[in-house]
C-alpha cells in the first residue's frame, strides 16, 4: 500500500463526536458526489477509489441519516485498473444535502458555512474528510515533500486553504488541469497536518523516515565537503611544489631565507599534507610551533619569489 493509503486507513479508524461527523461527512459528500433527478426523485451517487474512504462514507450516511445506501465495486479498464467504489442513495437525498449545507434555500453551495467548522474539532474533522476525498502525500522516502488536496471549485479550494491556515498551515492554491489544488511543501507543516487530522501513526512513520533521510543527506554533504577540502588542499600543494621546483632550478633553495627554506623542504617531504598537517610536521622536525596563518604566509612568500623569477 502507498503512504497515502495508510494515512487514510488510520483516519477512517478514528472515532468522531456527533458534531464532527457532520463536518467530515460534508467534506466527503461535497467532493465525491454527484446527484440527479429522475421520475422517481433525487438520487445521490458517491464515488471514490479508496476502499476505506468508501466504507467511511457508507457508515456515516447510515448512522446520521438512516438511509439504505447501496455499495458496488467497479474496475477501471485503463491505466492502473484500480477499483472504483460507488455508493448510491435514493432516499432522503434532499435532507442529506440540506443537513450538510451542500444545497440550501439559496441554491447549490461551494462550501459549508463557517458555523459548521466554528469549533476546532469540527474544523479538523472537515480537513480530515477533505483529505480522505481528494488528498495525497508523497512518501518521505522520495526526493521532495508534498501534500495536496484537489477540489473541483476554486471557492471550495480557498475555503480548505483558509481552514488550514487556522492551524498555522501555510497552504497555497493552484489550478492544475481541471482541478483546484491546495498544497503544502514544508515537511514540518505536513507533519503538523497529520497531527491535525489525527493520523498519529502516520506522523511517527513520516517523522522517522524524514529524520533518517535528513541524517543521510547531512552525512553525504559532510563527506562531499571533506572531499572538496581535500581536493583543494592537494591542488594547492601541487602549485606550491611547482613554485619550489622553479626556485630550486632557477637559483637553488639554499638562497632562500632559513624560514622559507625549512618550509620548502618540509613541503617536499609532505607533498599531500594540509596546512594543519604541515604545522604539526614542522613542530616535530624543528621543535618550533607555527600557526596555520604563519605557514600560509611563508608559502605565499615562496609563491611571490617564484613569480618574480618567472617574470625575470
Image: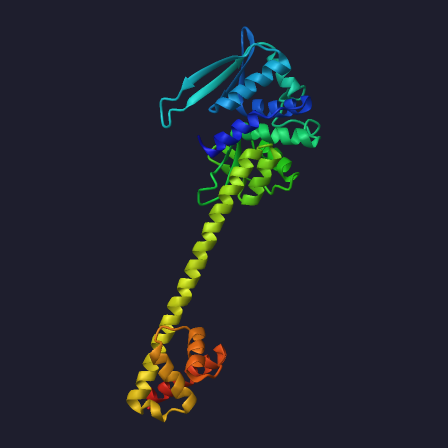
Q: Position of residue 134 (x, y in %)?
A: 52, 30
Q: Does residue 5 appear in the picture of this structure?
A: yes
Q: Position of residue 133 (x, y in %)?
A: 53, 27
Q: Position of residue 186 (x, y in %)?
A: 54, 45
Q: Position of residue 256 (x, y in %)?
A: 38, 91
Q: Nearer the viewer, residue 245 or 151?
A: 245
Quadrant, the C terminus = bottom left
Q: Is residue 260 above or below residue 24?
A: below
Rendered image quadrant of residue 127 = top right
Query: Which residue: 54% across, 28% down?
Result: 10
Q: Does residue 152 appear in the picture of this structure?
A: no
Q: Nearer the viewer, residue 150 or 130?
A: 130
Tell me which colouring the rendered structure shows.
rainbow
Rendered image quadrant of residue 79 = top left
Q: Nearer the viewer, residue 290 or 174?
A: 290
Outermost residue to the top:
40
Q: Is residue 69 above or below residue 137?
A: above
Query: Which residue: 59% across, 18% down?
Result: 60
Taking 95 as reference, is 211 left or right?
left
Query: Which residue: 49% across, 49% down?
Result: 214
Query: Which residue: 60% across, 27% down?
Result: 110
Quadrant, the N terminus = top left
Q: Is residue 282 above or below residue 15?
A: below
Taking 312 as reference, is 55 left or right?
right
Taking 283 as reference, is 235 left or right?
left
Amino acid at each position: 500500500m502507498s503512504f497515502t493509503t495508510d494515512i487514510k486507513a488510520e483516519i477512517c479508524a478514528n472515532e468522531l463526536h456527533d458534531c464532527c461527523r457532520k463536518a467530515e461527512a460534508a467534506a466527503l459528500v461535497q467532493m465525491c458526489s454527484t446527484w440527479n433527478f429522475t421520475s422517481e426523485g433525487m438520487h445521490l451517487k458517491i464515488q471514490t477509489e479508496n476502499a476505506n474512504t468508501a466504507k467511511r462514507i457508507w457508515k456515516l450516511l447510515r448512522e446520521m441519516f438512516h438511509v439504505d445506501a447501496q455499495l458496488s465495486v467497479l474496475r477501471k479498464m485503463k491505466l492502473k485498473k484500480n477499483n472504483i467504489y460507488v455508493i448510491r442513495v435514493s432516499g432522503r437525498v434532499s435532507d442529506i444535502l440540506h443537513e450538510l449545507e451542500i444545497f440550501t434555500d439559496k441554491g447549490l453551495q461551494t462550501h459549508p458555512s463557517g458555523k459548521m467548522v466554528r469549533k476546532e474539532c469540527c474544523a479538523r474533522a472537515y480537513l480530515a474528510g477533505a483529505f480522505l476525498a481528494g488528498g495525497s502525500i508523497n512518501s518521505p522516502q522520495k526526493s521532495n515533500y508534498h501534500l495536496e488536496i484537489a477540489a473541483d471549485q476554486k471557492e471550495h479550494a480557498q475555503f480548505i486553504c483558509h481552514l488550514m491556515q487556522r492551524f498555522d498551515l501555510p497552504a497555497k492554491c493552484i489550478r492544475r488541469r481541471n482541478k483546484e489544488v491546495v498544497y503544502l511543501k514544508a515537511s514540518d507543516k505536513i507533519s503538523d497536518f497529520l497531527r491535525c487530522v489525527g493520523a498519529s501513526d502516520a506522523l511517527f512513520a513520516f517523522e522517522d523516515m524524514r529524520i533518517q533521510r535528513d541524517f543521510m543527506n547531512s552525512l553525504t554533504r559532510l563527506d562531499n565537503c571533506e572531499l572538496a577540502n581535500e581536493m583543494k588542499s592537494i591542488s594547492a600543494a601541487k602549485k606550491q611544489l611547482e613554485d619550489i621546483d622553479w626556485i630550486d632550478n632557477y637559483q637553488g633553495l639554499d638562497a632562500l631565507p632559513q624560514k622559507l627554506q625549512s618550509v620548502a623542504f618540509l613541503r617536499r617531504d609532505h607533498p599531500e599534507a594540509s596546512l594543519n598537517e604541515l604545522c604539526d610536521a614542522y613542530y616535530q622536525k624543528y621543535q618550533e610551533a607555527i600557526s596555520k596563518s604563519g605557514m600560509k604566509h611563508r608559502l605565499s612568500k615562496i609563491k611571490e619569489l617564484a613569480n618574480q623569477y618567472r617574470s625575470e
